[in-house]
Image (tube, rainbow, N blue to C red):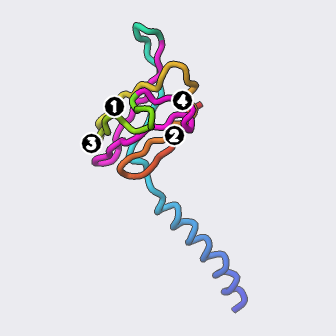
């Protein structure tokens, strides 16, 4: 009987932990950072790909608000929300003077943070 109690003490937390992992949400977008040579020099961009059936991008916050997002107005609101369907991509300029480390996307399916090295 004592062995059963000990086994239950270990089994219950293990099941709870595994359930948490299986319920974790998956981001509706994938994000890649890259640079592209333009007439104005090398410019940083983000390429956003929808991996959900449909997702709307409402806002993009660069480096926790420490870098301006050119596709948003001063208040941080998008000039025009962008809706993407599965597999569709959009290329977003991130501004030339930022060392991009983190981007937060506010979407129709929640907020998602991506980090870069």
Secondary structure beneath label 4: loop
Q: Mark 4 points at which residue?
A: 67
Q: Does the magenta stretch include residue 64?
A: yes
Q: Earlier in the sequence, mark 1 or mark 2?
A: 1
User: Mark 3 or 4, which is nearer the eye?
Assistant: 4
What is the quadrant of the N terminus in the image?
A: bottom right
Q: Which of 26 and 92 is in front in this view?
A: 92
Measured in 3D between alpha carbons, the distance from the residue under mark 3 to the one under mark 4, in whole angstroms, is 28 Å
Q: Which mark is residue 85?
A: 3
Secondary structure beneath label 2: strand
Q: Mark 1 points at which residue?
A: 90
Q: Which of 74 and 93 is in front in this view?
A: 74
Q: Which of marks 4 and 1 is nearer the N terminus?
A: 4
In the rendered structure, which segment of residues is drawn in magenta? 42-70
User: Mark 4 or 1, which is nearer the eye?
Assistant: 4
Measured in 3D between alpha carbons, the distance from the residue under mark 2 to the one under mark 3, in whole angstroms, is 20 Å
């Amino acid at each position: 009987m004592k062995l059963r109690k000990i086994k239950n003490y270990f089994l219950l937390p293990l099941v709870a932990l595994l359930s948490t992992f299986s319920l974790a949400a998956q981001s509706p977008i994938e994000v890649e950072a890259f640079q592209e040579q333009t007439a104005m020099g090398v410019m940083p961009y983000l390429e956003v790909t929808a991996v959900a059936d449909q997702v709307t991008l409402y806002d993009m916050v660069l480096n926790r608000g420490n870098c301006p997002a050119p596709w948003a107005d001063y208040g941080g609101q998008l000039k025009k929300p962008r809706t993407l369907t599965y597999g569709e991509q959009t290329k977003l300029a991130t501004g030339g003077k930022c060392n991009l480390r983190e981007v937060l996307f506010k979407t129709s399916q929640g907020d998602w943070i991506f980090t870069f090295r």
